[in-house]
Image (cartoon, helix red, strand yellow):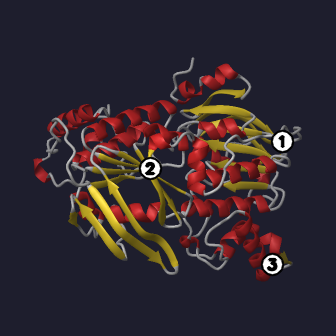
Amino acid sequence: MISSPQVQQYKEPAVPMVETVNLCKAFGTVQASNNISLQFAHGSIKALLGENGAGKSTFMSMLAGRLQPDSGTILIDGVPTRLTSPKIAHAAGIGMVYQHFMLMDSMTVAENILLGQGHGFLFSPRAACAEVARLAEQYGLSIDPTASVGKLSMGERQRVEILKLLSRNSRLLIFDEPTAVLTPTETDQLFVALRNMASLGKSIVFISHKLQEVIDIADEITILRRGEVVDSFARALVPDKESLARRMVGRGVDLAFSRPAVELAEEVLAITALNMFGLSNISLSLRKGEVLAIAGVAGNGQKELVEVLAGLAAPPRNTVTLLGEPWHKFFPQAPRVNGMAYIPEDRQGVATCPALSLVDNVLISTRELFTDGVLLSRQAAYAATLQLLAAYAVRPGNPQALGRALSGGNLQKLVVARELLRQPAFIIAENPTQGLDVAATEDVWTRLTEARKQAGILLVTGDMAEALQLADRIAVMYRGRFVDTFPISDTAKVNGIAAMMAGLWH
């Protein structure tokens, strides 16, 4: 069964667990990693920060065996090692918990953890559950080994992913934006588990754009900029978030976001007693000039609601009205200009096409802006794309570059730029800054705030800081229903958001 690590007095070895020396990786003319030399110590939590496109994902993919460096060396316990595949990286003790979990919903926790470990006919469900329970207790990751994964919360699913790595004796664990889908309470529980793992000698890599979390959890902080290490220091040397943001971006960033009042105008969205796809008696109204944030942990009905409002699933008649028109009249001929804009969470699978140029990705939803009759002016589209890339600091700034050449954050900035170009009257913004650095987040917040002067914005977010910064009202969603809807001026209810998101509000 699982080879469960032995609990013993931890003593740090003389050499780093993992070390990289002059690691380089290029994609064409783009130098994604340039002579990166870092050490990952036993029993330490290292945070990796950087703007979108700084090279974090490329560097971590080389450590995880998904990419091979062009030059440089990776040392495991002081021994040069070639990590030519994720399987080889796992065997070397390196594992990664990705933002999107890779679990089988129909299987139990124990079955998911042991999947692919080659137990064959010797697999014993009872013994497996006992081993998983012991492992979970050792690392403070409370979970029921017999539970079906499909019924778990996002925080519980993440624990299963972590236990999968620990069951394989992973010693260096990489966490990519691990709190993006967690409630505040689950985030606190994760941090306790990370500290516990570090105390038992594990090395933790923590990738996040949430600066307060980095300050709260990290022992060391390393900053990448344009593929190079530009700073590396102990957390104690960072006095506040503003200083950390300045080091990361290379300039001052105003984290005290201001949102001027806007006069409310006509209604742009009305939902009345919507019941479908697990949604239960959903009702709300949204007007021009306001931002209504739907807050909650992913998987509680937000995706189903967005699919209806974006025209991907038809609701029962007389339940949804968009810009004064019943859903069935508004779709499928929704106006492209001064109509509805949708900023999807899935920026690579839904919002863009990786194989198309940036010009063509802009044209996906703006073609009408560049046509005269049946003729499309690609010259005008090229010029507009070039302006958008510059205005939103999208890298690379070449309109002919393919979508796949952009990092996730830069791709998101392109999508926001494209959708706002249409001057919409109703905007659905689904986790619009997830995975964005502080500077890009500030820019998107500013542009959404400006857009609300002529639009009503439905903000779907699991980030409470984002909801409180942008929203006029908040609707907390749990298991397909609204627990409560209230203005952000209601301090008592704002303080209860974490409990509402966990289904504990009465």
Amino acid type indicated by mark 1: Gly
Residue under the image location 40 percent in, 32 percent down: 189
Nearer mark to the viewer, of 3 and 2? 2
The label number, if any, that marks residue 233 in the structure image: 2
Contact between marks 3 and 2 (CB within 8 A): the answer is no
306 relative position to 83: left or right: right
- Give the alpha-carbon distance from disc 3 to disc 2, as whole Å: 47 Å
The answer to whether residue 179 is visible is: no
Q: Quadrant of residue 373?
A: bottom right
Identify the element where label 1 is drawn: loop
For the N terminus, the image quarter is top left
* Position in image of residue 339 (x %, y %): 81, 55
279 relative position to 452: left or right: left
225 relative position to 101: left or right: right
Residue under the image location 54 percent in, 44 percent down: 211
Residue under the image location 75 percent in, 45 percent down: 457
The label number, if any, that marks residue 380 in the structure image: 3
Q: Earlier in the sequence, mark 3 or mark 2?
A: 2
The label number, if any, that marks residue 339 in the structure image: none
Q: Dot 3, crowdedness within 10 Å: few (<14), some or many (≥20)?
A: few
Q: Dot 2, crowdedness within 10 Å: few (<14), some or many (≥20)?
A: few
